Amino acid sequence: MGGDSLSPPSSAENCPLDSDASSDWDHSCDKLGNNAPSSGKHVSLDALLYEAEESQKAKVFSEVIKTYEDMQSSIDRLEEARKKILSYKPGLWADNSGSVDVSQPSRLNCTTLLVIGPRGSGKSTLINKIYRVLESDASVSGKAQVSCNSSVDGTCFLSEYRIQNGSGSFCLYDTRSLSDDLLENEEVLERWMRQGVRHGELVQRKSDDVSLMARTKQKSRRCCSYSKARAINFVIFVVNGLSVLESMMSPDGDKTEYSVMISATFHNAVLSFQDDKPVVVVTHGDLLPLAMRAKIRIFLGSLLGIPPASQIFDVPDSDDPASAMAVLGMLTYSLEHADRYLHSQNPHVFSRFYADHAIILWHVLVCAVMAIAIIYEMHLMYKNLFWESDTEVDWHKIRHLWSD
């Protein structure tokens, strides 16, 4: 989280160090500040660094706790925040970053947010919660299918959920859970980020067992064809707070696979837009004390290298106003950062789009040329047989063949 670095004082007036100990910086300084140890005059460098580290941790913890306090105090602006999201148009918030020319119209009429995360992180639940918050109705039925246990297949097809608001909109893409195999995750994410995502697309892995592959193929036969590809404009990374806590508290490090997997996936370069990394959502936090939820965000901030107070959002499963404000804050962050790159869309998606159409057109032209060539050859053959034969027929000599 930054902070001022600790360096030896340069002035003897401010800190009268003994000449013999100046090189080792072993003596404490009377004016180091309130955080300096006061139990003795001789303090080691390790102790000073430890005090500085603890002070920094306390500062970060205070910043994260303050986000919860600010959330409670801003509940009266809930309707205003909801209207801001519902009035969103692609490219409308680009001027907040100052990185693009807003006078140039966006080539898209829909901003695409990709929702990814490990199994059980609550991706589909988050999408349903977003709908409830935007429609200001907790009784709204779920749009996305939610899996309640590990015995079911879960989300196997890419699903688009569009938030329509007149002249513009944004959509959320629910995805299949991340695999335990990091290489499989890299392959899938690389394809989505470079080639785009399509509603209804079946997501299969090499590690899928035979029965799962058979079931998903049977489901895909009953589905409509894929929609057109959508370029991804920003990524929402969802993690289960309870799983993160278990990984944090593992005494022997035997349950750190979860942290390793989300760290490796999060740091995949294809998920970032220049220096902008995905926004992180922590779910299931309502089952934990507030202080522990704050520590989880701080742990994730250190693990992923992002500020826990501004880029990691704690979205519990409850339908209270504070939770709704967290959802709206996360959407605001995502759309503001997505708008920075709407005018410089991933060229891989558009080149792939035109390449696919060029291939189809090429095949049509080849087939047409072959058909014309075949018809012409047949024409020449019949012409040679019936119209240009060198044999002359004496009709007078053979008239008896039909006169009898």
Image (cartoon, rainbow, N blue to C red):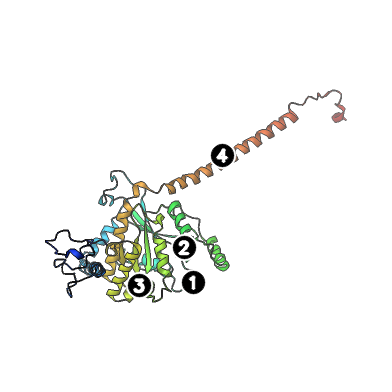
Residue at which label 3 appears: 284
Residue 22: image x %, image y %? Answer: 20, 63
Which residue was labeled with disc 1?
152
Q: Residues within 10 Å of mark 2 (few under 14, many from 20)?
A: some
Query: What's the distance in space between the residues labelled 4 and 3, CA to CA?
Result: 56 Å
The local secondary structure at tag 2 comes to helix
- Distance, label 2 to label 4, CA atoms, is 42 Å
Question: At which x and y percent is residue 89?
Answer: 31, 52
Query: Which quarter of the figure has residue 119?
Result: bottom left
Ranked by sequence position, the earlier of labels 4 and 3 is 3
| Badge 3 amino acid | His
Residue for badge 2: 182
Q: How many marks?
A: 4
Q: Which residue is mark 4?
A: 365
Looking at the image, tell me whether mark 1 or mark 2 is earlier in sequence order: 1
Residue 326's spot in the image, x, y percent? 28, 66
Give me the residue at 80% from left, 25% from top: 391
Residue type indicated by callout 4: Leu
Q: Give the residue type that dot 2 points to.
A: Leu
Q: Say above or below: 178 vs 376.
A: below
Callout in the foreground (2, 4): 2
Which residue is most to the left?
Answer: 13
Q: Which residue is pictured at 29% across the width and 44% down the height?
A: 101
Q: Pointer 4 and pointer 1: residues touching (CB < 8 Å)?
A: no
Residue 86 to residue 68: above or below: above
Tags 1 and 2 touching, CB below 8 Å: no
Residue 110 visible (yes or no) = yes
Q: Residues within 10 Å of mark 1 (few under 14, many from 20)?
A: few
Task: Judge left or right: residue 17 versus residue 254.
Answer: left
